[in-house]
Structure formats: structure tokens, C-alpha cells
Amino acid sequence: MNEVKKKEITLTIDGKKIKSEWGKTILEVARENGIYIPTMCYLSKVEPIASCRMCVVEVEGVDGMILSCQEKAVDGANITTSNDALFRERQKIMELYDVNHPLECGVCDKSGECDLQNKTLEYGVDAQEFAAKDQHRPMQNWGFVSYDPSLCIMCERCVRVCNEIVGDEALQISVGGYKSTIINVKQDEDCAECGECMAVCPVGALVSTDFKYTSNAWELDKIPASCVHCSSHCQLYYDVKHTSIDSPEPKIYRVTNDFEFSSLCGAGRFGYDFENRTATKESNKLKEAVEAFKRADTIRFSSMITNEEALLLQKIAKSVDARLVCDDAIGYQKFMKAYSSVSGKSLYGATLDTLKKSQMVVILGTRVYDDAPMVKYAITSAVKREKAQVVYLHPIEDNRIQNLVTQFIKYEVGSEEGVVSLLADTLIKKDGLDKSIKSLLDSLDIGYLSAESNVSEEELEQLKAKMWKRKRFTLVVGEDLYNHPEVENIARFIALIEKYSDFDLIAIPPASNTLGVSLICELDESASGYIVGYNAPGDYTLSALGDGDIDMPSLNQQEGTFVSIDKRVVPTHPALPYSGYELLDIAKELGESSEYIIEFTPSLPTKKGFKSINFDDLPDYFDVTGKSHRGYELDMVECESGSLPSEPQEIDSYDGTIVYRCNSGRAFNPFTSKCEQLKENEVTLRGSAQFAIAAKLSDGDSVKFTIDGIDYQRVFSIDTSLKGTIALNPIFDIGLSSFALSSYRFTKVKIEKTGQ
Amino acid sequence: MAKVVFSTWRGERIDNRGKDPSEWEESAFKLPEHYDESTPAKAFIGWDGVAIFTEELDAVRLAMEYAAQYQKYSEACGRCAPGRWGGRILYDLLDKIARGEGAFEDLEHLKEVSQTMMLTSKCEIGRTVPKPILDLMEFYKEQFDECILNAQKSKDYDNDINYIAKVTAPCMDMCPSHVDIPAYIEGVRDMVFTDSLVATRQTMPLAHTCGRVCPHPCEDACRRANLDEPVSIMELKRLGADYETDHGLGFLHPQEPKPPRNDGKKVAIVGAGPAGLTAAYYLGLEGIKVDIFEELPVLGGEVAVGVPEYRMPIDKYNKDIELVTSLESVTVYTNHRVDANRLKELDAEYDAVLLAFGTRLSKKVRAENEREDMEGYWGAIAMLDKVNLWNKYGIGSPASNELKDTTVVCVGGGFTSMDVVRCSIREGAKKVIMLYRRDEKTIIRNTTYEEYHEAVEEGVEFIFHSAIERIVDEDNKLKKLIVNRYELQPDPDGGRPKLVKIEGANFEIECDWLIPAVSQAADLQLLPKEWDIKLTSWNTLLTNGRDYMTSRPGLFAAGDCEYGPMTIVNAVGQAKRAASVISRYIYDGKVSLTDEEIMEDHLNKLGVYDKKEKITGWMPGIPRNVSQKLEVDERRDNNLEVNLGFTGEEAIAEAERCMRCYYIAMVAV
């Protein structure tokens, strides 16, 4: 039967001759060709669910009705998507869906954007002719999300995204026929509370607990934007309307997205109210700011910045002859430069989409669950759909991703350079390899490196064995490496791996626009003298948090572009007005002639891969097939190559109590920390029971310690999901200081107990 | 062939109502007229119609109860809109009529909802449940009308009638272990691989094994074959098991294993092969103390020492074994041969003993001068023991010491002979010949196309239509074989073609080894003579094939030692049933079956799969996915697993071909 799998197929849908290719479903082909087939449960980004049965069609020569969402389009098929019989059955299904559905559209959050409402009207269901005994089904509060089982139509979309996209497997179907409901089995533990479930809910069953009863859907204006919190820069809309009857000030009520095709994490979905509302325009403040810039020896900023402002800062720094420092990007820039010097390319090879299609993933130097939710989502897709083998190398095991990881390799803190050299030796194909590289690899003292890093040769053999007969490999690396003292050599080894093995690389940009900053700015290593800080600490600070010497707009009040982890330049638009000065106002005082910040968009450096396209010409949508047309993809630029890594340095040993700088999945920075729904009352230092013994601490102890000159006062809590003697210390609550850290993420610290 | 008052089963239209019993037309199907020995059935209702065995039937209640059973099933599913709501409404409306509160328009609504369910439900169960209900509404219309007109309850509404139902599917029915195949495939489709595995383990603990080396009789009963090609059922099974192993999850059980009962009851099992392990698993899950006695130093029986590594990697099989031995109630004793004296001790000491020792005697090829003590004559079981004990456990010595650069002749035609020849290739034999009496088609039917094809690729020479007449030795060392050639002569009466020797066509093969793999027999020396255990005509332990008790009370038998050399899945199915019977027997001393098991047997007798059925509502022409295999050069000199299994994409595409052919059958007694 394999001849059926010929690539090109021709079929007819509703009389229209269509050319397509084997493997697509009837529904996909129809949609690509603008033919409407109604669905209730279908969701483009997951595999067909097939619960609603609305999408049935008729196929000539085939008896019965055919489920178009699941059945493949076959060469020569003649398909009818609508006729009286199909209408009747679809109408019947809607009648069944409507049986006992509460008539509370007037107060339901979903009203106006409800699929059940829409299809009920479309199929003219205006009476209920039979009933089933009603059941008592109380509402449930799952934290960020509330679930009303009586509104639930059991389409299973929420369960699908939780399992197939997010990977938390928190939502399950509690089967019970007419009594079926959705349950959250991880309500009390580690459900990521990402809100994906409510985003895809076609009815009012899953709604935001915070948003509930605050607005009708049709009153909200949707402002298209890119999420600012991490380097994924996911597509979203800020849903905006006036604050209240008394206040015409616009306010963001919630975040929505094109959930058919893209996803968000909890920070993106619930962390939207970080705008700077307090700003005013006082000309003396502006004058002060201008003076500060003129005086500056160093301009320090953070990766929470648009490309345009990064470029502007670069210009200002040049004009006032100041050093330009960005602590959360410097390590990454060093990494990428060293990477390019070996690979000959300006950018790494993989994207989140290629990661999703990988059959094997190796993760190194990142606690990926917390560092990069979208990377975790992509790995989930790879595991679920491609049966990917996932090797996770890190000093701390993460049992929240046990369902994703197939091999955990624990290495010693600080030994990253040794580990990448071992990986290079394991993964690089030796046949036909350049002599110099071969002799470099041959000269590695595997026994020593293995002993020092605690990565055994058996573990590496196992890793290698997983590659057997697989295709599509991705290496994912993260922040632990960028701030390692030997970052450049590490990067060179990694570039070597990408160049001479089957692996493609993703180097996760550690903060929001780190990739953009590292391409646009020439950064200096460290700050000195008089420091002007833009969303970073300084002698004079400009702060979008509202706590500086002068206010600045936050990123939901600005327009401009970011560079995403997918190496795309994506646009964002201001959701809220801003009444103070912005960076361009100061620049104008310093001689800048541009009127609007987006005038810089076409001037972003083309030699780094940017394109000379005006901001207003940047597309921002998904097409009907789900292909992203957001902004543009950076050009891959050839770089001078030829350098090689050197032998790894001797590995420093980290003994005793070690603290790892790590925010949690929904808390990325002081801006997420400012958001009402994401605020955490108590920020804790979390460690294992073993850590508690080593550090002589008990659960609930108050502790203090100092890292990078910052004093932390924390409550210590024992996290039974952790093992080993490394504790996790978040930094999202320390304000702008968190943007001035460029040290290695692991630090040996002395922890002082201050109380219980 | 059943006596019925009325039947619409599988398209027949029999209506003997009011006729003289001598004029009754018989049904063409083996319908369950009797539920068990002592209980006559009133009616049988299922996916394909309804059969009535009594004139005094309450058709309204029967319809309502059937809808109620669907409602109950749907409580384990309810995953499509028509099924979830339709099933509920079907039941509510029928009950309304049956209790005398119905209206004529309810009948119309019933028909409408039935139509929607039949056209659009996700599983076959939703599509088929309305059928017999509509039949009853049509042919027993007067009873429905009466209830509505007179606003009265149906005649048996308050009477005590037992309605016993069972969910099945053609594939489940055909599978000797009755694995819930649509459920484990659904787990793959949904990418909830843990659910998939748990569904398998309800009746099949050896998920790794039967996801790799099962000859999948289920696929011969796959309704998808009526449309295009059967679903690749077997290979989808390993996804759940591989997921559990790859992700280092703890063992997933179909139910939380119960703590040991410590009530003094205990069961002995002789043999730790598929049957012994299966029985131990299901008894152990119930907290019943089980001791397994295994003669070999390793666990796993023939799958461990017979099936080669390249087909069934031992690290995977060991996971299946560990699943069983990890249970608190299960203890194993290896290197523990049970002889007649020991069996007598076990019989005295334990509340029940299950014999599951397989068939480990190689049968002879029946040639002249065939002597087991001849150098070069090597029984298949012993040869495979040696190969596998060394390759998998490092016990003994490599078989290549014996086989390297030699000429090997194997006589066989089944799976064991395939293992012999393919292992011989891997152990470095210079020439490997398979002699088979019949033809290529038959050997493929007896094994699989892949198995035969792969053996040919690896260099095995197949000589068909031939059998050894005489073995020639020199000083008791095998020298050559004198082989007769046969031809197939068609039977003029249309029977099976006969093998006829071609005179003068004899030929000789010089060889170093003759490995007979024609069949295996049970080694019955452990049966105490005085017990006088009843045997089958082919010298295996006789049971009734339903409860698996031998002629000696308390002594049970399952697997090959009961059935004769058969498949793993057959051994598992028998042992699961035996374990269920034993779990009751050790408390009440009675041999009994559950309703579920009785229904299972009824349905099996009736036959669930209908080869001639026309499939509707599914797109034909979606090809079966084929998993990637190692190339011949990649596999012929090593023991790497040949079948790489489905990629994720292939697995999901294959799972989407499953039509979820669940059915409900119900008997009224």
C-alpha cells in the first residue's frame, strides 16, 4: 500500500480541484484552501482530538460520515463538506452539547467569544426538546484558573495542551460518561499554572480567576505585542479597556493570544500589569537626566530593552564617550562571539520549531523548567510526538521533568568546560575530521576530565547509544555557561560540536532581549566611574519600575522590536499610554534628531543580520496553516572562523554549601515580580533535606548570606523534590540589582542563621 | 446453531413467535441459549442485533437495560459528544417509557438521537448500541406502544432479572489474553503513554515482550482489514513499556498492588516462563502469596533462553520480569528443579499448584539412524539454551565455539527453527540450511513474513518440500543427510494438498550439525505416577480449557505444558484465567468463573469479528505504517535488536488508524 504515500495528491473539495501533499488531514487541506468545516474540539497546535465530531464530511464512494480532522486526504478523493444531511447531524451534535448547558451567557466571561454560543446560533438550535437529569457540579478554584464543570463540554483541548504542549500532565479526564469532568491532579504541587488550559477552552469552563466577571469580551481592545519577560518573545495581545466608571484610564485586563498556533507560559499570561503609571513630565528631571548622561563614565542597562533603544544607547554611549555595560548580556555576547569564531556563523542553527521535531535533545547548563518555559514546551512536543530521547546534564536533578528526560547526567559544579570537552569527544564524528581538531580531541585527558566532572565514560557511552538510528538532534545550552569563567572556551567546544556532529544548537538567551543586545551593542566588561543605569543600578538611575531618579516607560508602554530565541525580529506595541519622558527624549537633548524610536528599526545593523525594514512594514500574524509571520528572521551572517578551543583548565572544586541563582518558572525579573497575580509574599531559599543538614538549617529558619555584594535575607525551606547540597536562590525580588549580575550562577556561600 | 424465538443477529431475520416449536427456524449462530450449565438465557443483545430465547420477553426493559449498560460503559469513556450525551439521553428516554411515563414523541427523539450516534460516534460502541434497540422498537413495537398508551410500567420493570454485560472488540476477543487493545492504542494516540501501558497490563504483564515478539493473532481480526489493512496492533504495545523504561518511572500497575494477605494461603508455581510469571503477577497484585520454582538459573522461560536477543533484548524482558518479582507477595526460587517427589511436597504444602513448565523436549525428525548421542545432533532447545545463556547472561560458553565455520542443517518450519537458523548465522556458521516439508507460503503462515524474509536476507538457504530419510555418521560423528524430495499433489476432492515423495529425487547434504526444531514436547517426568493425571492425546496436561484445573483437584496447568507449544500470548491468557480461578479456589475449594469470564467464553464461541462486514464512516486507503528494521549488514553478525520500532510520528499515525471497535454484549437471565 506504500504507493499511496506518494507525495503529491490531487483531490476535490466542494467541487474545487486542489493539489496538496500526502500526510495532511482533510480539514487541514480544506482550511489551507479557504474552505470552512465547523469544529468544536479541533486545535491546530495539537494532534486531532476527535471528540466533537462536528467536522464530519462526506466522501464520494465511501459510506457514512468521515471525520475530517483526523482522516488523511487521499489522492483522488471527492469530498463534500456541507449538505443537508451533514447540517442535520452537526445540528444534532449542537443540540446534544446544549442539553442542560446553563443559560448564563449574560454573566459568563466567554460570552461574545464562545464557540458554543457561536455554533448554537450557526446551527439554529433555539429549543431543547429533550433533557437528561441535571447534576450538581460545583465550581473549582485551581489558583490562577477556575473551572466550572457545568459549562464544560469535554472537548479535551485543555488536557491535550497540558500533556502535549506544556508537559505537566496536570489535567486529566475523569471519565464518567455524562458525569465526565476535567481534573487537575497537580493542583497542590507543580502544575505550572501557565493558563494554557484556559486559553484554549472554547467555552466558559476554564477562566482566569482574576479576570472573572470584570469585563465582557467585546469591550476589550486587543493590542498585539510580544511578551517581554524572556527571550521567547511569544505573540500575545494585551486586552485593554478603561479602568472603571470613574476612571477613563486604560488598563490591561488580561493577556490573550493566538492560541490555535502559539502558546504562553504563566509569566506571559499573568504578568502583564508591570507598567509604570506614576511618571510625569517635569523638565528639571529631564535636565538632570541629560546632565547625568553627559557626565557618565559608564552607561549600564539590562536586556529588558527593545532593539531600538539598545541601538540608541549605543549611540549615546559613543557620543558621551562612556563605557556601555549590560551585565545580563555580556556573558552571552562573549559566548556568541567565541562560538562564531569557530562555527563561522553569527547565529546558532536550531529554532524552537526544529527542537520540537528533534528525536534527540541534549540539555546542558540550564535549569530549563525555570529558565525557559518555551524551550521546555518544545522539548515536551519532541518527547510526545517524536519519542525523543532527552539527556539532561546539570548539577541539580529536576524531577519535575522526569516525564521528559530519559537520561540525567549529574556533573560537578564548575566543571562545565570539562563536560563540553567530553561531549565534544563523544559527539563529534571522527571520520575525515581535520587533523588539528582530531589531535585536539585526542589530546583530551578523558580519564582526568571524567573524574573531575564526575561524568563517567559509561554515561557518555549511554548518551551516544541513544543516537543510534535517530535523526534530528538538538543541543540546548543555557545561562550556566555564559557566566562561567571559561565561557569562551566552552563556546568554542560547543561550536565544534555543532559543526562536526549531527547536533544543531540553541543557546538560550538568558534574559529578555539578550540576543538583540549582544548583536547590536559593543559591550564593555565592567562598569566604572560615574554610572548611569537604565533599568540597572547606577549612580543615576532611569527606572521603569518607578524607583529611580527618573521614570521610564516599561516595555508594555513602548513600541519597538526584540530578537527572539528563534532569531526573529518581532514587533511589540504599546498597550498603555505613558505620561513621562522616555530615553529618546533625553537623546534628543543630546543631539539625536529622530522623532520616534521606531525610526531606528530599519537602522539595526545589517552586518549582524538585521534587515532594513520599517517598523510599520513588519508583519505580525499567523497564517491559516499556523506559520508565523511575525517580523522577520535574522540573516545568518558569515563570520571569520578558524579558531579552536584549547584544553580545558583545571577544574576548581566547589565543596560545602552552594547556592544556585534561579528564579522560578513564573518569576523572571522585578517586572514579573511587580505583577499583581505573580507577586510572592515570601521569597525563600530552597534546598534539599541534605542541604539543610550540610548547612545546619531547618525548614523555616531565617537566614542571611551575601552573594555578589548583595545581602539576602531569606526564609529557608526544605524542598523534598530537590537532592544534593545545592540550594536555589531567586533574585526577582531584588529590584534593578538583579540586572547587574554577571557572575557564575553557582556560588559557594556561608549561610548565617538569624532566627526561626 | 441456536434455538431462538426471534433473532436479528448479523442480518438474519428469524421470527418464530407464535409458531409451533417444530416449525421453528434455527439461528445460524452459536448464540448463548444457556448462560451456564444451570441457567437458561432469556435474551442476548449486542452490537449486531438481538436474539430472544423466550416468548415471555419484556423488550422495553431489555432495550432500557442495554442502554443502561452503554451508559455504564460510557462512564469509563464518554469521550465524544454523541456518545457522552446521546448515551445518556437514550437511557433516560427508554427508562421513561419503561416506567410508564413516556410519550410517542419520545420514540421519535430516540430514533433521532440513535441516528446521530450511529453516524458520528467516536467508537463503534456508540455507533452500534442503537442498532438492537431500534430492532426491538421495530419488532416489539406493541410493547413500547402499550407502555405509552396505558401509561404503565413494562411487564418486568420491577421483576428480578439479571442482565450481564461485557464490553469486547474483535481484536480483544481474538487475543488469547484479551488485551484491551483499543485502550492501549488510544493511550498512544493521546500521547499518554502511561495510560497505554496500564491498559495493556490489565491482562498482559509482558508488555515489552508482547510488543515485540507476539505473532499478533489480533491483527487477523482487525476490522480495519475490511477497509484497507489491519492496524499494526502489536508494535504499538511497546510504546508504553518503552516510555516507562526510558523515563525511569516506577512500575505502573493496573491497580495498586495489595499488601500481602498473610492469611496462610499460598500458591506454588512451577516454571518462571510467560505463564508462570503472568499467574504470579495477577495473584501477587491481589496480595496472595506466590512462590515460583524455576529449574534454570535465570527467570523467563523460553522467552529468556529460547527467543534470541536480536528479537527480544533481555534488558527489556527483564523489565517485564521485574514487574512481577517486584511484587511483595511474589518470591522466586531459581535452580530449583521440581521432580515428582518435590511436586508431591508442594501439593501437600500449598493450597494450589500451577504447573507452567512449558515444553522443553525437542522432538525428533523421525529419520533413520536418528540418535541423540550422535556427535553433531543437537536439539533446538539445548542449542538455543546455549546461545542465549551465553549471549544474555554470560553463562556457559559461546556457541560459536561449536558453530563457527560449520555447516548447519535445521529441520523445522516454525518460530523455533527460525531462531535456530538466524542464531547459527550470528554465531558464524559458514552455511545454514533450513529443510522444510512444505512450501514457502506455509512457512510464512506459520511464522511471519518478516521473520522469513529477514532470515533469507541474512543468508539462510531454505530447501522446501524435503525431509530427511537417513542420517549418516562416521564413528558416531554426523557426516551427511540423505534427503527425500516431495511434491504437493492437489487433492481431487478439494482437501489439503498431499505431500508425495518424488522417487529418485533424493539428494545428500554434507553437514556438521543437524538441529531438529520440528516441535517440542512436555517433559512429564515430574508427574507422580500414582496421581494418574489425565493427558491430552498429544501428551500435555488435560484441562477443560476454561478453568485450567487438571484431573487432580488443586493442581492447575497453563501455557505450553497444557496447550502444547504455542505462543507467549496464549500462555499469558491461560495463566491469567488460571490465576483468577485459583484466587477463588484456595478459599472456597470450588472451581468457578466470573461473569466476565463466562461472557468472554460465550463471545469467543460466537465470534466477534465478521470478516464480511462492510465498514462505514472511515476513510479507506490509509496505509499501515511499517517500522524501520536494521539493514542486513547491520545485523547479521551481532545481536542488536532488528526491529527499531515506530518513530513517534509513525506510532501516532498508526494509532489514528484504529477504529475503536468496542462492542457491548448483554445476556438477560
Image (cartoon, coloured by chain):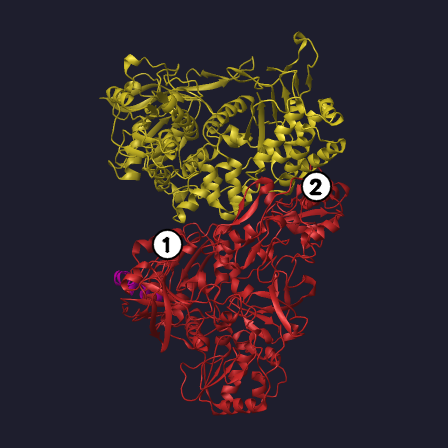
Q: Colour of chain B?
A: yellow
Q: Quadrant of the C terminus of chain A?
A: bottom left
**Main structural element of the magenta stretch: helix, strand or loop?**
helix
Residue at 58% x, 73% y: name it: A556
Q: Going by the image, does A684 lie left or right of B101?
A: left
In which quadrant will I find the N terminus of chain A? top right
Disc 2 residue type?
A: Val
Give percent across and percent down for residue B490: 53, 17
Report the residue at 47% width, 59% height from top. A376
Q: Is residue A711 above or below residue A175?
A: below
State the image coordinates of residue B186 (x, y, percent, origin top left).
53, 41
Q: Position of residue A97 (x, y in %)?
A: 67, 45
Depth check, front residue: A211 or A201: A211
Residue highlighted by disc 1: A463
Q: Residue at coordinates 29% horizontally, 66% vertically from top-left?
A: A657
| Label 1 Cα neighbours within 10 Å, binned few <14 / some 14-19 / many ≥20 | many
Element under label 1? helix
Up-down: is B469 above or below B314? above
Q: Disc 1 or 2, which lies upstream in sequence?
A: 2
Q: Amino acid at mark 1?
A: Leu
Q: Badge 2 is on which residue?
A: A59
Real-space Cα separation, disc 1 to disc 2, in angstroms: 48 Å
